[in-house]
Image (spheres, helix red, strand yellow):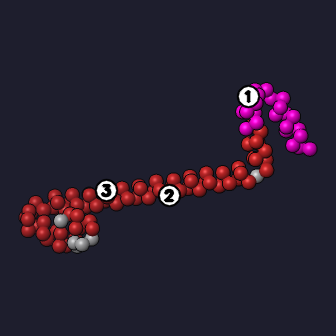
Amino acid sequence: MLRSLIAGSLDVQTYEDTLREMFGIHAYIAFTLDKVFIRTYNIGILLILIVFLFLSQVLASATKQLQVLVSEEVSVKLLQLHQSERKNSATGSLRLIIVKHSSSS
């Protein structure tokens, strides 16, 4: 019966009337439980939506940053420099200074 209420196939008044027939004056406990369950269920859905919106914003931001990384000339040059430095296993800063000087000309 509670599933029918949550699914929307049973209205609240019919649900309460049925519980009164089954439990008499003690039906208020079931009324309270269904309201707590429905509110908890709605809060759960709300939390899922908030997490989804947050993750979609993070993904959009990361996508934008990646687009900038691959489209800007300076970013591409820095990525190429990083790859060549890793390949050469250079640890000094002399090469960086030389590349920086040549790219500013």
Question: For the stretch drawn in magenta, what is the main secondary structure?
Answer: helix
Find out whether residue 94 is within the magenta segment. Answer: yes
In space, the residues marked 3 and 2 are separated at their CA atoms by: 20 Å
**Residue position for label 1:** 89
**Residue position for label 3:** 40
Residue at the right extreme?
105
Q: Quadrant of the C terminus?
A: top right
Seen in the image, is 50 located left or right of residue 29?
right
Q: Quick one: label 1 or label 3, which is nearer the N terminus?
A: 3
In space, the residues marked 2 and 1 are separated at their CA atoms by: 42 Å
> What range is drawn magenta here?
83-105
Q: Residues within 10 Å of mark 2 (few under 14, many from 20)?
A: few
Mark closer to the observer (2, 1): 1
Instruction: Give residue 53's mark.
Output: 2
In space, the residues marked 1 and 3 are separated at their CA atoms by: 56 Å
Residue 6 lies, with reference to residue 95, above or below; the image says below
The one of 47 and 74 positioned closer to us in this rendering: 74
**Mark 1 touching mark 3, by CB under 8 A?**
no
Find out whether residue 87 is within the magenta segment. Answer: yes
Q: Quadrant of the N terminus?
A: bottom left
Seen in the image, is 72 located left or right of residue 43?
right
Residue at figure coordinates x 26%, y 65% from the top left: 6
When asked about the image quadrant of residue 22, the answer is bottom left
Three-letter residue code for mark 2: Leu
